[in-house]
Amino acid sequence: MPHANLDVLNKLISARHELAQIMEFKSYADFAIRPNMAGSPDVAMSFLLDLSKHVRCKADEEFNVIRECKRQHLNERSADLEPWDEAYFVGMVKSSAYSLDSSVIASYFSLSRCLDGLKMLVESLFGATFCQVPMMPGECWHPDVVKLSLYHPQEGDLGFMYLDLYSRKGKYSGCAHFAIRGGRVISESEYQLPVVALVCDFIGSPGSLTSRLNHYEVETLFHEFGHALHSLLSRTDYQHFSGTRVVLDIAEIPSILFE
Ligand SMILES: [Zn+2]
């Protein structure tokens, strides 16, 4: 790290501490976690310590394998594993020790299969199905976009999702869920249905169906789909509290479960 950055980081830490003190919190951690469901650093810490009891043994085992890989690679018996080594040496261990070929894994995950899998999960968990619905002229922002309705046999339409899955020039890169309209009660007999968009940047085109996802992309797709379902299935009086419009640690639960 360039040395000049250390000074910047120190200033950032003291500015955060000052902010916390002005707001009458003990520390920045107290201040930052307060609006979340966890509520205090102690709750977060005891959760982490408890979790660590369950995973520690296996994690230590894997850590040793990865450190050994680095030592052999550098031919340096005392080399230690640093946080910035992780992605590189994890990848190396996966391909050498476990002869994991990511292109073989990707061959199981065509995008169309992943979408079928998601539909199957939604049907078995919530008894609802996705079906494509027509759009009004000018309703969508690009001809690749399709509109789905989340439909339940007894409840009817539960909400709508625009799917914009393929990368193209000038498009947002990455995979994300956007809430376009939150659900809310309009009157005793009327509910405003939520509308969301799932925007991804997979390689391919809507007609081809041959687009293959690597494992990380599958996880990301399922994660964002979890956010989309959170929005579509939520029923709130006010749209400001609809779906993912909640504190951060709650917002990530449905997505991480789906992932
Ligand atoms: Zn998320």
Image: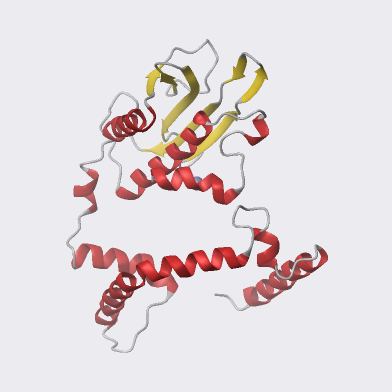
Q: x, y percentage for residue 90?
A: 31, 66
Residue 171 visible: no
Residue at 36% x, 72% y: name it: 56
Q: Quadrant of residue 240?
A: top right
Which quarter of the figure is the N terminus placed in? bottom right
Q: Quadrant of residue 204?
A: top left
**Is 230 left or right of 182, judged from the image as shown?**
left
Residue at 69% x, 67% y: name it: 28
Along the line of sight, which residue is nearer the eye, 203 or 177?
Answer: 177
Q: x, y percentage for residue 132?
A: 39, 17
Q: Quadrant of residue 189?
A: top right
**Is 119 left or right of 161, judged from the image as shown?**
left
- Residue 70, compared with residue 128, is above or below; it is below
- Residue 129, compared with residue 224, is above or below; it is above
Residue at 43% x, 71% y: name it: 84
Name the outermost residue toward the bottom. Answer: 78
Counting the numbered discs, the total is 0
Residue at 71% x, 70% y: name it: 27
Q: x, y percentage for residue 14?
A: 73, 73
Residue 140 visible: yes
Q: x, y percentage for residue 163?
A: 44, 28
Along the line of sight, which residue is nearer the eye, 103 or 181?
Answer: 181
- Residue 94, compared with residue 182, is above or below; it is below
**Is 130 left or right of 244, judged from the image as shown?**
left
Along the line of sight, which residue is nearer the eye, 64 or 253?
Answer: 253
